[in-house]
Amino acid sequence: MKGKPGIATDNQGFISNAGVVITDEGIVVVDALGTPSLAHKLLGEIRKISDKPIVKVIVAHYHADHILGLQVYKDLGAEVVAPTGSEKYLNSDVSTNRLEERRVSLFPWVDEDTRLVFPDRYIDKGESFQLGGVTIQLTMVGDAHSDADLMVYVENDRVLYSGDVIFEGRIPYVGSANTKHWLKVLQEMERKELAALVPGHGR
Ligand SMILES: [Zn+2]
């Protein structure tokens, strides 16, 4: 589901992208969008085409515009996984202050019932897993756009969900970036042969 890239409070908070991988054995969601109502909306879209369980939500990085929908999937029993290093954001005032701010700036879509959902599992290094015959690779990027970024590659379709390592249509948020490492990551990515690349924001 594709948000309109803009400032975080535009478009009812729908400014980032989320991905869905539907298999015969279950569904993987990549990023959770910026409000619970957006996550519900995506869930509604998923349910039009599949009634399989949402088994996993992969958080490419912890920033409010990608994670405040997590509780919707967590409450359905999905496993939430995220890169090691995300705990820096979660354990700092930044995450709680940002949530408080969004409860005002994105009210009523973010409200008192909106909560920070921590990962069930942190990923330290790259791994891949199979679900319903689909192979999904998780690549650890480290600190580039945020304290901890990862990318999700759907091998069967050669589709890459880059998270906020790639922004399209707006200037990247660099408030917690390591730009030197980020540029290195981008140079390495140019070698990959992809059928499609889904950025964290934009087309
Ligand atoms: Zn971000």
Image (tube, rainbow, N blue to C red):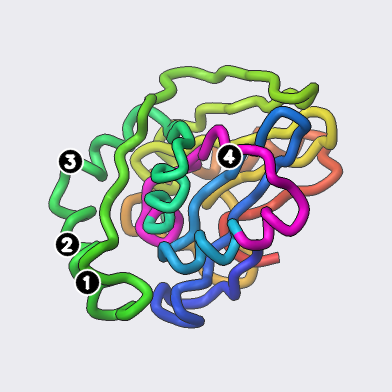
Q: Which residue is mark 3?
A: 91
Secondary structure under tag 3 reads loop
Q: For the residue with label 3, is its CB less than 8 Å from the closest atom of ligand 1?
A: no
Residues in magenta? 44-67
Q: Residues within 10 Å of mark 1 (few under 14, many from 20)?
A: few
State the CA–CA distance, disc 1 to disc 4: 29 Å
- Look at mark 1 in the image and give the residue it sits on: 101
Using the numbered discs, state the Cα–Cα distance from disc 2 to disc 4 in whole angstroms.
Answer: 29 Å
Q: CA distance from mark 1 to mark 2?
A: 6 Å
Report which quarter residue 126 is drawn in.
top right
Q: Work out whether mark 3 precedes mark 4 in sequence or the reverse, and give the earlier one.
A: 4
Q: Which mark is residue 97?
A: 2
The mark found on residue 54 in the picture is 4
Tag 3: amino acid? Asn
**In-image side of 91 versus 12 (left or right):** left
The reply to whether dot 1 and dot 2 touch (C-beta < 8 Å) is yes
Residue density around tag 4, few if under 14, some if 14–19, many if 20 or more, within 10 Å: many
As displayed, is residue 180 above or below residue 36? Answer: above
Residue 157's label in the rendered image is: none
Residue 92: image location, x then y, percent: 16, 46
The secondary structure type at the circle numbered 4 is: strand
Q: Is residue 93 magenta?
A: no
- Please report whichever mark, 3 or 2, sits nearer to the chain's N-terminal start: 3
